[in-house]
Image (tube, helix red, strand yellow):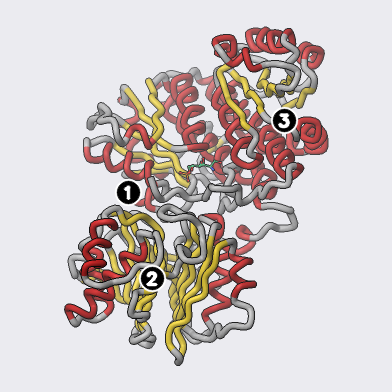
Amino acid sequence: MCGIVGYMGDQQAYPILINGLHRLEYRGYDSAGVALLNGHGLHVHKCQGKVSDLEKHVEGRDLGGTVGMGHTRWATHGPPNDINAHPHVSSSGDIALIHNGIIENYAAIKEELAHRGHLFRSDTDTEVLVQLIDDIRRSEGVDLPEAVRLALNSVVGAYAIVVLDQRDPNLMVAARKSSPLVIGIGEHGDHFIASDATPIVEHTKNVVYLEDGEIAVIERGKGLKIRNIKNQDKTPFIQELEMHLEALEKGGYDHFMLKEIHEQPRSIRDSMRGRLNLVKGEVVLGGIKDHEEKFVKAKRILIVGCGTSWHAGLVGEYLLEDLARISVEVEYASEFRYRDPIVDEDDIVIAISQSGETADTLAAIELAKGRGATIIGICNVVGSSIARVTHAGSYTHAGPEIGVASTKAFTAQVTVLTLMALMIGQKRGTITGSRFFRLLNELDAVPEKVEKVLRNEAQIRYIADIYKDATNALYLGRGFSFPVALEGALKLKEISYVHAEGYPAAEMKHGPIALIDEEMPVFVIATKGGSYEKVVSNIQEVKARKGKVIAICTEGDTVVRDLADHVIEIPDAPDPLVPLLSVIPLQLISYHIAVMRGCNVDQPRNLAKSVTVE
Ligand code: M6R
């Protein structure tokens, strides 16, 4: 949550910062601001609203300067307004700071500083930190990096910060703990700072991922130095980015979400590439090779994640239990971390996260790691915090996901989990050779089948038009399709603000059936295989109460076609692979309903892509 960006070099900072803020806007979009340093001191411009509102706000103002920083906010402390927007400036007017994270002990520090005469203007925890740094710098007579270091030793919480002081216009200081920060090193001595690499990639491919507890000091003409908050020097580890600029553009689509839905044939294929070998008849997940033995002997696997990643984890449970016959528990990371779970060194914990930065998932990992479990990550963002703290893992190769609603990340996660379950199942001998080879071939065919589902978009848009004014919706599925029902409901509610619930189809008669009337659209995943007949009975139950049924069914299924109000057909596939196909129409229907309702699809209200606060 919150995106931060910084620049020092020979170019004008403002255009670089604004461009960077546009790239990071998915992280939060309730207010934005920039601070620029030029020969005339510090200039801060900020306002409530999106980055485009900031651009209007600064029209006609002095935007010169080759050093600066920018922020796009997702409010935690204090409502979104001009005053609470970042950057925050110390009462002396000398120091400005931007922050992503939460300072948990801000109230105690604020009280202390108020006694010492500091005046506070905002409701934020961040302002406390900038005042503290200024106070230390003055009272202890230390330079800016040291004042930042001492201040960070007094705070509890999570932060990624950038700090500027108008008395040192050639210095930029940044630090992180539990919130991400990347530093780009340009060819001509320019330095870029950002919450992730997306604002940096068009300037340089050379980056340093700051570690927890590290402070970066960038000085004009002298480059980057890193120390930690214990004052030990660290050698910057420069890595090359593999990201491509085109992946960050809409590429002709109206929204990132639509582009990302349509990218799924490619992203699923990329997540299998080099891992699924049809000729040799094997699955190789290089990232977890060293832990294969542990998987083979495992008695239990725990899966942790949040939101859509948790839904992918639920599909993982069905996959691992079916194919590898290992008992699996899927946990909301936020619950797991606070309930003293039973975990030990025999356990394998799979942590799933698109961003690799979700605070609750990170905390769940730390807890399980502390108890000796082996932690395997399934992340999309290369070099992210979760990817770095896990013992091993397999990246999903979905490419950058910018739309706040997760789409291609889900199918990429499920693809990796399918490969994992197949690989472990084969090694454990819990899957017959013929089933293994059939699933391998069927999995290889999934991208083509997804393309086919995407070709039904016109029909899906037609159905969306019929139900766009609904105020509630139910999503039902059984077995492998139950997590997809949850995911379909989440997609609809988060981008179109229509109340939606996902249920195992058989649970409907234990309560939700009371909601059904002629106004209620019920999306039912009723594909052949598994509990097909039972789901057909559930459809009949809905119809008997005049509910409107939109069924996702297998191509050519006339039984469901005769019962349902609308059907969206998907190609036939074995049960474990159905989620990769059945979720696509649900993503599209949510997208089109949201567009028809005039919602901001890529930046839904109150949300942010990367949830780095608990
Ligand atoms: O980056 P992560 O996968 O860890 O994020 C988890 C959730 O915040 C995320 O899936 C969220 O639920 C999405 N908005 C769903 O579309």
Residue 342, percent across and down? 25, 26
- Picture residue at 62% right of the left edge, 13% below the top: 514
Q: Which residue is mark 1?
A: 389
Three-letter amino acid code at the position of disc 2: Leu
Q: Which mark is residue 470?
A: 3
How many numbered tags mark residues here?
3
Confirm or reject: label 3 Cβ below 8 Å from ligand 1. no
The answer to whether residue 476 is left or right of residue 2 is right
Relative to residue 66, is residue 438 depicted above or below?
above
Three-letter amino acid code at the position of disc 3: Ala
Tag nearer the camera, 1 or 3: 3
- Picture residue at 23% right of the left edge, 32% below the top: 345
Q: Nearer the viewer, residue 220 or 530?
A: 220
Label 1: few (<14), some (14–19) or many (≥20) C-alpha neighbours in 10 Å: some
Along the polypeptide, which appears first: circle 1 or circle 2?
2
Kindly report the distance in space between the C-alpha atoms of the residues bearing marks 1 and 3. Answer: 43 Å
Q: Nearer the viewer, residue 163 or 105?
A: 105
Confirm or reject: label 1 Cβ below 8 Å from ligand 1. no
Residue 481, percent across and down? 59, 23
Along the polypeptide, which appears first: circle 1 or circle 3?
1
Along the polypeptide, which appears first: circle 3 or circle 2?
2
- Picture residue at 28% right of the left edge, 30% below the top: 339
Indicate the secondary structure of the residue bearing disc 2.
strand
Q: Which mark is residue 97?
A: 2
Relative to residue 123, is residue 577 depicted above or below?
above
Three-letter amino acid code at the position of disc 1: Val
Kindly report the distance in space between the C-alpha atoms of the residues bearing marks 1 and 2. Answer: 28 Å
